[in-house]
Each structure stands twice: as C-alpha cells, then as structure tokens.
Image (cartoon, helix red, strand yellow):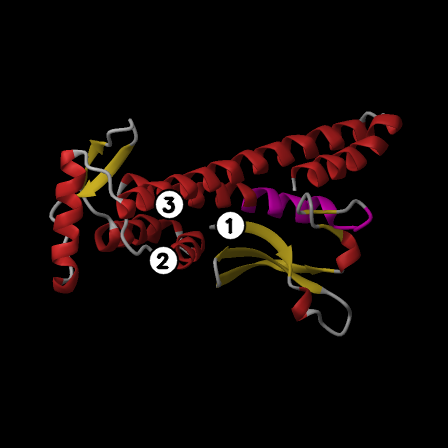
C-alpha cells in the first residue's frame, strides 16, 4: 500500500487550482482524503510533497502537510500491525487507512478494534526448514471446498516437507514485507534530504542548495 500527498490535476477548477489530497493506493484500489486547500501545479513540488516558497501561504500549507505526513506514518503502522502482527486475512487496507485517518479521536479505538475483530486472526509461528518463519492461523474458519487442500499443506509444513505452494506463499510474504520496508526507508531518506535542502536555503549556502536537486535526480535515475 502506498500513501502520499498529491495534486488532483484531474479536478482542476476554472482558475487552474487543484485540490491537495492524500492518495492511498494498492493495486487498482485508490482512495483520496482532501487536505482542505487548492494549489496551482507550479506551486507544488511533487517530489518533496511540499508547497513552494513562491506561494504566499506556503508556511501554513506546509504545516498542514507536515501534520498529514506524521498521521500517514501512524496509520500506516496501524494497518501494518493489523496485517502482520494480527495476520489479518482479507484486510481492505485502503479502506481501513481512509477510515482510520478520517476518524474522530473518540471513535479511533473502536474503528481499530472493528478491523482487528473482523480481520485479525490468532496465530502461532512455525519455523520452516530453511530458517524462515511462517504464521499459521489458530481457530480460523476454512471454506469447505478449500479444507482438504489446506490440511494437506499444513501437514507438509509441519513435517518440514518442501512444497511449491508453500514456497510461493513464503516468497510472497517476504516480497510484501520487503516492499513496505523499502517504502519506509525511501520516505525517511527523502524527508532527511528535504530538511538538509531547506537548511542550506536558510543558511544561504547557494552553491550547495543549487546542487542538491540535481544530485537527487541523479540518485533517482541510477536507482530506477
């Protein structure tokens, strides 16, 4: 799942102003949460997700964005906890994110509990022969048509026998966890980079501040 702050250029009004929103997506599922203000495209830096200094309200709007980024991180952690710590089966992550983000403070815990109760599954952790770990649901209801297949896989797994389906499930779980970890690392790096860039601008280190955006583009081109 990916959550970031973007301009809704497809919703540009007659004055060329676009709503600024949090966009949450996973696969083909997309949801958006408006931040309550609009901008022209030339006043918004899509890479750093910030309002440029040329806009008269850049300080106020960037404060709103900063608070939104902090809340995005909080909600991402909650959804990840549901997905991994509680092994939530079929969790609608985009819907859960939007509902938790938009919730009033007094309703937050009850909404979180709702997703935990509806999708969280008690599990036990079992070590796979190659050293990897896998969570197995306890007291989880299985569809009748899938029962024989599930029992067969569990028996193979408990005996340490290799199976292509088990290997694929383990590999898929590792890919999801790796993607989430990489996304968090990239977000942390870009925020630190942006802080350093702003520091150079404040300190009027013109030579350094001119090079920073170019260096970032070079890094992105080599990591693509």
**Dot 2 or dot 3, earlier in sequence:** 2
Q: Residues within 10 Å of mark 3 (few under 14, many from 20)?
A: few
Q: Height in image: 20 above or below 60?
A: below
Dots 1 and 3: beta carbons under 8 Å? Answer: no
Majority secondary structure of the magenta segment? helix
Q: Which residues are magenta?
A: 54-68
Q: Nearer the viewer, residue 70 or 164?
A: 164
Distance Cα–Cα, label 1 vs label 3: 17 Å
Mark 1 lies on residue: 2
Q: Disc number at residue 92?
A: 2
Residue at 45 percent of width and 38 percent of height: 178
Classify mark 2: helix, strand or loop.
loop
Can residue 13 be seen from the camera position used here? Answer: yes
Residue at 64 percent of width and 36 percent of height: 190
Circle nearer the viewer, 2 or 3: 3
Q: Height in image: 123 above or below 24?
A: above
Q: Residues within 10 Å of mark 1 (few under 14, many from 20)?
A: some
Residue at 50 percent of width and 62 percent of height: 30
Mark 3 lies on residue: 172
Q: Nearer the viewer, residue 176 or 214?
A: 176
Residue at 16 percent of width and 41 percent of height: 156
Can residue 87 be seen from the camera position used here? Answer: no
Residue 55: in magenta span: yes
Q: Disc number at residue 72?
A: none
Q: Height in image: 174 above or below 152?
A: above
Q: Residues within 10 Å of mark 2 (few under 14, many from 20)?
A: some
**Dot 1 or dot 3, earlier in sequence:** 1
**Residue 212 vs residue 154: left or right?**
right
Residue 202 image point, x, y percent: 80, 29
């Amino acid at each position: 799942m990916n959550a970031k702050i973007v301009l809704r250029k497809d919703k540009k009004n007659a004055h060329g102003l676009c709503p600024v929103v949090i966009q949450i997506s996973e696969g083909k599922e997309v949801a958006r949460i408006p931040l309550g203000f609009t901008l022209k495209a030339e006043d918004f830096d899509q890479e750093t997700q910030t309002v440029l200094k040329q806009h008269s309200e850049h300080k106020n709007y960037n404060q709103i964005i900063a608070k939104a980024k902090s809340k995005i991180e909080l909600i991402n952690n909650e959804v990840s906890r549901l997905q991994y710590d509680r092994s939530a089966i079929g969790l609608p992550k985009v819907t859960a994110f939007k509902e938790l983000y938009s919730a009033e403070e007094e309703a937050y815990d009850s909404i979180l509990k709702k997703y935990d109760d509806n999708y969280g599954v008690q599990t036990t952790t079992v070590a796979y022969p190659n050293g990897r770990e896998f969570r197995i649901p306890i007291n989880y209801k299985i569809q009748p048509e899938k029962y024989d297949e599930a029992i067969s896989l569990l028996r193979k797994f408990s005996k340490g026998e290799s199976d292509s389906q088990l290997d694929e499930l383990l590999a898929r779980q590792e890919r999801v966890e790796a993607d989430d970890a990489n996304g968090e690392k990239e977000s942390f790096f870009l925020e630190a980079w942006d802080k350093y860039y702003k520091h150079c601008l404040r300190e009027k280190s013109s030579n350094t501040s001119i090079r920073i955006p170019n260096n970032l583009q070079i890094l992105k081109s080599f990591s693509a």
